[in-house]
Amino acid sequence: EKDFEARFNIPHITDVFDDAVSIPSTFCLRMRTPVSEEFAGGYPSDEEWHGYINKNDRVLLKVIRYSSPTSAGAECIDPDCTWVEQWVHRAGPREKIYFRPEEVKAAIVTCGGLCPGLNDVIRQIVITLEIYGVKKIVGIPFGYRGFSAKELNEMPLSRKVVQNIHLSGGSLLGVSRGGPSISEIVDSMEERGINMLFVLGGNGTHAGANAIHNECRMRRMKVAVVGVPKTIDNDILLMDKTFGFDTAVEEAQRAINSAYIEAHSAYHGVGIVKLMGRSSGFIAMHASLASGQIDICLIPEVPFNLHGPHGVLRHLKYLIETKGSAVVCVAEGAGQNFLEKTNARDASGNVVFGDIGVHIQQEIKKSFKAISVPVDVKYIDPTYMIRACRANASDGILCTVLGQNAVHGAFAGYSGITVGICNTHYVYLPIPEVISYPRLVDPNSRMWHRCLTSTGQPDFI
Ligand code: ATP
Ligand code: MG
């Protein structure tokens, strides 16, 4: 007897509105037509194959077979069981929908920092809404701030407006940090008659989206709030990856290659590249793995010493002596313990980090000067160049599917959810589960060890 219960419940409109009625979907699925009579028997008939996703369809989140119950540890609830299986809700169009398209006013908002693919997601949400038959689609300008700023008008959106926006990076709607309170946002939604809200943003934005969902429920507003996780750092729990990450890793190669060429072409050259990653070093790790040009990769999850017999500087001296040059890749959140705390915060309340790249550059110069060894250090921070890129092909596809599924989720009557990809399948997850803490690189994982094998760096502790 297998248990296909989903690991998480996702909030549905019928949880609070017993009287919520559904109608047949207005989203038309293309039917598969047999190519010839000969093959016709191999295809299911139209009645058998309707292509809609059933609410009980599941995606396998993870499956592990442990060699013994002890190695399963806390994950295994049943002490005699060495199998762990977890299922989550499959995303996609439903046969019955809970909103009449002609009664929908949908709004899209993008918050936080820029990330490749934002325009791709906006575009796909608009296109899919139109296919459902929605006529009123608007963009909220400059993040959550656009809900309160009187001088900012909502932007009418249609296929015509969004047709080519994916060809450039950034966000058509603009982004911001900080902004009005949740009750002000919901007041504004009520005033504007918005009953579907698509929120593109990171952890902070999703915390906001969940709060908006809860506030709407409290006011008994029939509203669907659906998030699309936008985090270039790939730091969202449970998902294979988030959009923009692939593009960021690819784009980081250019900066790393430039740093390598600079270092290689100078006498005793050291190149430093700082990449995004406030608490998660996925970009730095993957870019190091992809480039093969990094000698030292430093990430927030793995503590390191700069000075001392096992410090980064001693290893750099060894590299200069043996190879003549070296390239360091550092994530922005790494080594913050070496920098003076300023207590500065941005408009959203995030701690403003000191520049670890500049600090390492200065320490290298000082320590080599002290031993009278010449060194030529070049520091590259490609952050804003990477964030502003347009999405690459693989992110473009990811954004397309996420955008479509966000709309399917809203029409299916879900709210307080976000869309993602798990084990290569697309899923809906409740917002609180994916943002309870940032996803981190496991220093004991094979991937981090592969990275160390590739760079050849020792432990700096
Ligand atoms: P990024 O990955 O670029 O940092 P983010 O979504 O985390 O994206 P933030 O600047 O932290 O970016 O937050 C974006 C928006 O969400 C801001 O307008 C902020 O006011 C709001 N916000 C942040 N945290 C919360 C929270 N805990 N509750 C409600 N709203 C929040
Ligand atoms: Mg954030």
Image: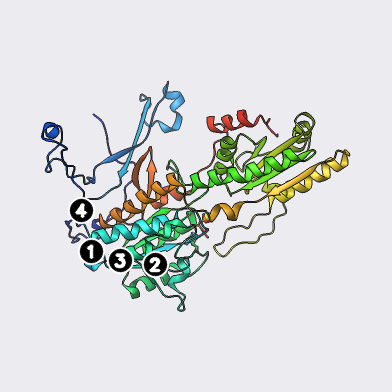
**N-term-proximal mark, 1 vs 3:** 1
Q: CA distance from mark 1 to mark 4?
A: 13 Å
107 with respect to 167 (left or right): left
Residue 239 rendering spot, x and y as whole percentages: 42, 43
Q: CA distance from mark 3 to mark 2?
A: 13 Å
Residue furthest top in the image = 67
Residue that numbered label 1 is attached to: 101
Residue that numbered label 2 is attached to: 139
Residue 287 rendering spot, x and y as whole percentages: 57, 40
The three-letter amino acid code for the residue at tag 3 is: Asn
458 with respect to 2 (left or right): right
| Disc ID at residue 114 | none
The three-letter amino acid code for the residue at tag 4 is: Cys
| Disc ID at residue 28 | 4
Q: Around disc 3, counting alpha carbons within 10 Å, would you say few (fewer than 14), some (14 to 19), or many (20 or more)?
A: many
**N-term-proximal mark, 3 vs 2:** 2
Q: Residue at x 17, y 60 (%)?
A: 21
Q: Image height check: is 137 above or below 351?
A: below
Residue that numbered label 3 is attached to: 195
